[in-house]
Amino acid sequence: MADGAASQEEVLKGIIGQPTGTSKVVVERGTVQHFADAVLSTSPIYHSPDAAEAAGFDAIPAPLTWPFAMEFSGKFDEIQPNDAPKGNPLMTALGPLMAKGGLILHGEQEFIYHRPVLVGDVLLGEGTITDAYQKESKGRTMTFIVSETKWSDDTTGEPVVTARFNLIHRA
């Protein structure tokens, strides 16, 4: 292993289980419709309350990959929890790696649904680093950081969707 590999390994082990943040989002019709259009969906359920109801939904549902983008729209400053963790352990590990160059890649993404995400939902997301490790591949070091965000209904506390995301740095 290269110099500093042990310290990087310790950094990676140290971020497992650390919170990545807490966010509250409002699922809004306009952004859901724009997202559906952006992923080239032609389904009317993302645009019409009547079509959504006819398909068995209580409101317009969000497309299945929506949770990836959900935190970037509908996250208003005034509704964020006051006790949300500050900082993100992801950068504790990635910052020094990025300073050395290399590529950042979006690895696998997974969504585990407990019920559909619907327009009008107010969801609370709590993120955690669930794994961090390195592998050698073709003479290069690849660092994998896996995060998981559990989204629950802000009113009932019931789980809605769990989003898992794998970020990869290749040096």
Image (tube, rainbow, N blue to C red):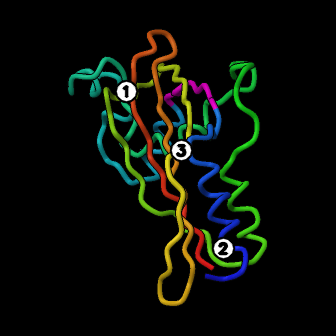
Q: Is the residue marked by circle 2 packed among few (<14), some (14-19), or many (20+) residues within 10 Å?
A: few
Residue corresponding to mark 1: 60
Q: Position of residue 31 (x, y in %)?
A: 54, 37
Residue at the image position 62 percent from the left and 37 percent from the top? 19
Q: Position of residue 3 (x, y in %)?
A: 72, 80
Q: Quadrant of the C terminus?
A: bottom right
Q: Does the magenta-highlighted stretch encompass residue 28?
A: yes
- Type of the residue with mark 1: Ile
Residue at the image position 35 percent from the left and 23 percent from the top? 49
Q: Does the magenta-highlighted stretch encompass residue 110?
A: no
Q: Which region of the structure is painted magenta?
A: 22-29
Q: Quadrant of the N terminus?
A: bottom right
Q: Position of residue 150 (x, y in %)?
A: 47, 32
Residue in the foreground of this view, choosing between 54 and 65: 65
Q: Earlier in the sequence, mark 1 or mark 3?
A: 1
- Type of the residue with mark 3: Ala
- Could you tell me how far apart the alpha carbons at marks 2 and 1 are, in whole angstroms? 49 Å
Q: Earlier in the sequence, mark 2 or mark 3?
A: 2
Q: Earlier in the sequence, mark 2 or mark 1?
A: 2
Residue at the image position 38 percent from the left and 40 percent from the top? 63
- Could you tell me how far apart the alpha carbons at marks 1 and 3 are, in whole angstroms? 17 Å
**Foreground: disc 2 or disc 3:** 2
Residue corresponding to mark 3: 69
